[in-house]
Image (spheres, coloured by chain):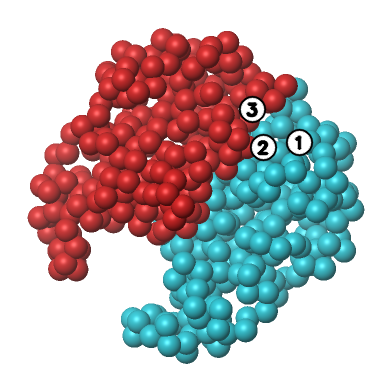
Chain colours: A cyan, B red
Amino acid sequence: MLNLVIADTALETIPVKLFQHPSLKKIRNSGKKPTEILLDRTFHHFAILSSNLKDDYKRGRPDILHVILLSALATPLFKNNHLKVFVHTINNQVINVGDNLRIPKSYSRFEGLILDLIKHKKIVSKDGTLLLELKDNQSFSDLIEKHIRPDVIVGLSTNGVLKNFEHVCNELFQFENPCVVIGGFPKGHFSSEIESHLEKKYAISNLKLEAHLVISRLLYEFEKINDS
Amino acid sequence: MLNLVIADTALETIPVKLFQHPSLKKIRNSGKKPTEILLDRTFHHFAILSSNLKDDYKRGRPDILHVILLSALATPLFKNNHLKVFVHTINNQVINVGDNLRIPKSYSRFEGLILDLIKHKKIVSKDGTLLLELKDNQSFSDLIEKHIRPDVIVGLSTNGVLKNFEHVCNELFQFENPCVVIGGFPKGHFSSEIESHLEKKYAISNLKLEAHLVISRLLYEFEKINDS
């Protein structure tokens, strides 16, 4: 079983201190609460820029998580229950992705699903299967130490040691309960808390590759070893 | 150079005969014209169901194209100009994807880009590079015979002959100007016009895999041969 953690993910609802920004007047007038809207740079760029949010360049990109989840959950590896997926957010929430989740390709459906999850903390299918579960106040350390308890943690980062996918997968495959970590944010690097847990850190290419592409290729190579 | 055609793609603006449907009243009242809105099953499901649109189960899924393009355009193969991408739509429009296009991961930005393309027929970057070009009344045959002129056409379809990615890529790589065709629609099979052009038709798996996953893995294997 491979564990995948999407870490420091740029997923959160609108911070209260942003909500009073003049550029969000229309949203305020709509009657929605800030906790009912995902922070999204496409719509809230000026509010983000002028509000001195910590690490603002890493925030407000729920579309990045959407595309990574689409790539990971479409794999036979996931469908055959050889992959567990966890999302750790920049505000220390953790989302546990259930084995049977099919993630909607439509962004507005995805957004609705995530807002529902943030409100109710759980998404359960009609037949009672847990599809998504969200826990507040869970740090990356909590997730690793209390929940996954992996026997190796490998980070993927542009500032890691250059190795190809086959190498990284062969290494992961030596372990019983390996964990691979990738960033769910647009720019920058892992926070220091995450860095402190990474036993190895690899870069896959000299090119700056999108996280969804890296995950997609890594899972494919892992699947090949797993099937052989 | 590999050519990729996303065929019978479920991309179109709202058909005029749908626009009068009672469920679309709110959209009509917004002042937008039907030509300024992409047909989308997430929002127009009831209107699609009750309007007797031909092949309605294959229509109204622009999110599928979005995810396929994200997968294809993120590859080093595309970034290094070894891949040409064409979109053929269910209404016989053809979109030529420029070599330098970066497709937005945000769906609302993607939607805006496509609506802009439908209106102006071209998207040009600030420095004058052609990013996207749309031609009306271009059949799949026109695209193949007049534009791409490939020396082999391979279709990927669940009802093709079962072969793995390496096999399909090795075969494509034997040719100077190969073309691979995949469907940009949610269900069903290629239209008969497309079928008539396919010299070979392969299935990659017994599992029903998403088109974006198939393309992502195919391009990765092709890249490996190309780089070796």
Q: Amino acid at mark 1?
A: Phe
Q: Residue furthest front?
A: B127
Could you give the CA–CA distance between mark 3 and mark 1, rounded to whole angstroms? Answer: 13 Å
Q: Amino acid at mark 3?
A: Glu
The mark that comes first in sequence, 2 or 1, is 1
| Mark sitting on residue A165 | 1
Residue drawn at 57 percent across, 85 percent down: A51
* Other-residue count near label 1 (Cα within 10 Å), few / some / many at <14 / 14–19 / ≥20: many
| Mark sitting on residue A217 | 2
Q: Is residue A78 visible?
A: no
| Residue A107 x %, y % | 44, 56
Q: Are marks 3 and 1 on the same chain?
A: no
Q: Is residue B133 visible?
A: yes
Q: Amino acid at mark 2?
A: Arg
Contact between labelled residues 1 and 3, with CB atoms less than 8 Å apart: no
Could you give the CA–CA distance between mark 3 and mark 2, rounded to whole angstroms? Answer: 12 Å
* Other-residue count near label 3 (Cα within 10 Å), few / some / many at <14 / 14–19 / ≥20: some
Per the image, label 1 sits on a secondary structure element best described as helix
* Other-residue count near label 2 (Cα within 10 Å), few / some / many at <14 / 14–19 / ≥20: many
